[in-house]
């Protein structure tokens, strides 16, 4: 396989590595633009608070008995929801969350929070429940789950950043794999590290938000607050895993199988001293010596012994066989 074949062999894992990086970038773009419907559909977790049912009696505050407060109590849940500023839904992404309302049966994102590293969704803070007394409605299990969720998001964010960086390095090092299998081996090592962190990120995100969804639905169902997962986001995340894993396998294959050397032997017929392997070349006679390119100079006389020149005489006198003037070039 020549250099052209080597380039083709490297092209597939390189394309898979780039596809994995694109998926990771798409994950990071989720929830970054409230005016982009496609990005708004990329979220890990969704809290649906459209039908939230919290009565004023659930609040740990004293409400004076006046016609105004009587009217507020009669309006019930909508008044409490509007008072604390709760929207119809919340989408939790990697860097932030977005919120909005239902209009004509469709989601309309109206705001996205500022992006921040190691972001985690705190419903008490996001729903402005700090001073309302509503946060006492959260069970101990939910509070414990939110605390674990806060800790896990830090690891998830670190795994994501390392995955992106190592994938970029994998692509850059992969360029050198075109020239040698040693470059492929180095790329395989980087690809392995990248795949480990991509898988770690995907597993953490999937398990983390699945657990959070279960906690929300168990603790807040009585208040008509429901949690769900964002299917589009997880499809992109696990596609990144698949592309990265496939790239690693093909990088490994290219490091042991795809050589850049040609299998065809090239010969130089006109070069001095270059002989085709497997062909025959003339050897000196055992009965004389050659002085340069001229004819063989035969010597005779008492006590003279012809030089063998490394060629066996095959016991000419004993076996009655003739001397062979040619030998194979590879002998």
Image (cartoon, rainbow, N blue to C red):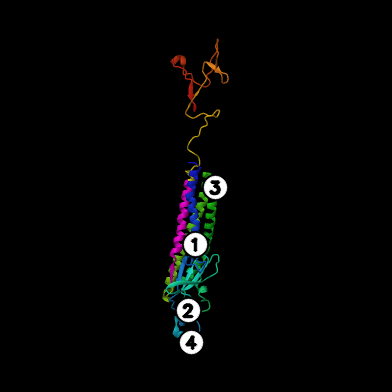
Q: Which residue is mark 1?
A: 27
How far is the residue under mark 2 from the one under mark 3?
59 Å
Earlier residue among tags 2 and 3: 2
How far is the residue under mark 2 from the one under mark 4?
15 Å
* Residue 89 horizontal side relative to residue 299, left or right: left
Residue at the limit of the structure toward the right, as seen here: 292
Earlier residue among tags 4 and 1: 1
Does the magenta run of residues contain 6?
no
Rendering coords of residue 94 (x, y %): 51, 65
How far is the residue under mark 1 from the one under mark 2?
31 Å
Q: Main secondary structure of the magenta part?
A: helix
Which region of the structure is painted magenta?
A: 226-253
Dot 3: element: helix
Regarding residue 80, the answer to whether it shows in the image is: yes
The label nearer to you, 2 versus 3, is: 3
Q: Which residue is mark 3?
A: 176
Regarding residue 65, the answer to whether it shows in the image is: no
Rendering coords of residue 244 (x, y %): 48, 54
The label nearer to you, 3 versus 4, is: 3
Dot 1: element: helix
Q: Are marks 2 and 3 in contact (CB under 8 Å)?
A: no
Q: Are marks 3 and 4 in contact (CB under 8 Å)?
A: no
Rendering coords of residue 218 (x, y %): 42, 71
Q: Which residue is mark 4?
A: 69
Does the magenta run of residues contain 234?
yes
Q: Which residue is mark 2?
A: 81
Rendering coords of residue 70 (x, y %): 46, 87
Earlier residue among tags 1 and 3: 1
């Amino acid at each position: 396989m020549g250099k052209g074949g080597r380039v083709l062999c490297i092209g597939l894992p390189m394309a898979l590595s780039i596809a994995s990086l694109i998926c990771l970038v798409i994950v990071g773009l989720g929830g970054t633009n409230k005016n982009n419907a496609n990005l708004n559909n990329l979220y890990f977790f969704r809290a649906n608070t459209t039908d939230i049912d919290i009565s004023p009696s659930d609040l740990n505050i004293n409400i004076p008995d006046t016609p105004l407060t009587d009217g507020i109590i009669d309006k019930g849940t909508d008044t409490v929801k509007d008072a604390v500023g709760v929207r119809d839904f919340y989408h939790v992404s990697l860097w932030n969350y977005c919120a909005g309302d239902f209009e004509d049966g469709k989601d309309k994102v109206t705001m996205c929070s500022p992006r921040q590293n190691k972001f985690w969704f705190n419903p008490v803070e996001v729903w402005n429940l700090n001073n309302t007394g509503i946060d006492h409605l959260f069970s101990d299990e939910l509070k414990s789950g939110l605390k674990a969720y806060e800790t896990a998001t830090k690891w998830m964010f670190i795994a994501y950043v390392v995955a992106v960086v190592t994938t970029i390095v994998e692509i850059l090092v992969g360029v050198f794999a075109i020239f040698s299998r040693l470059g492929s081996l180095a790329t395989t090592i980087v690809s392995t590290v990248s795949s480990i962190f991509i898988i770690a990120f995907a597993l953490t995100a999937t398990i983390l938000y699945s657990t959070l969804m279960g906690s929300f639905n168990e603790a807040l169902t009585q208040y008509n607050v429901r949690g769900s997962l964002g299917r589009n986001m997880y499809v992109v995340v696990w596609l990144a895993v698949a592309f990265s894993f496939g790239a690693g396998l093909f990088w490994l294959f290219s490091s042991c199988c795809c050589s850049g050397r040609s299998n065809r032997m090239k010969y130089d017929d006109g070069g001095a001293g270059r002989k085709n392997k497997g062909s025959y070349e003339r050897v000196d006679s055992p009965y004389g010596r050659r002085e340069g390119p001229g004819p063989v100079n035969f010597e005779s006389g008492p006590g003279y012994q012809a030089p063998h020149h490394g060629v066996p005489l095959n016991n000419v006198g004993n076996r009655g066989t003739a001397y062979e003037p040619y030998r194979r070039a590879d002998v």
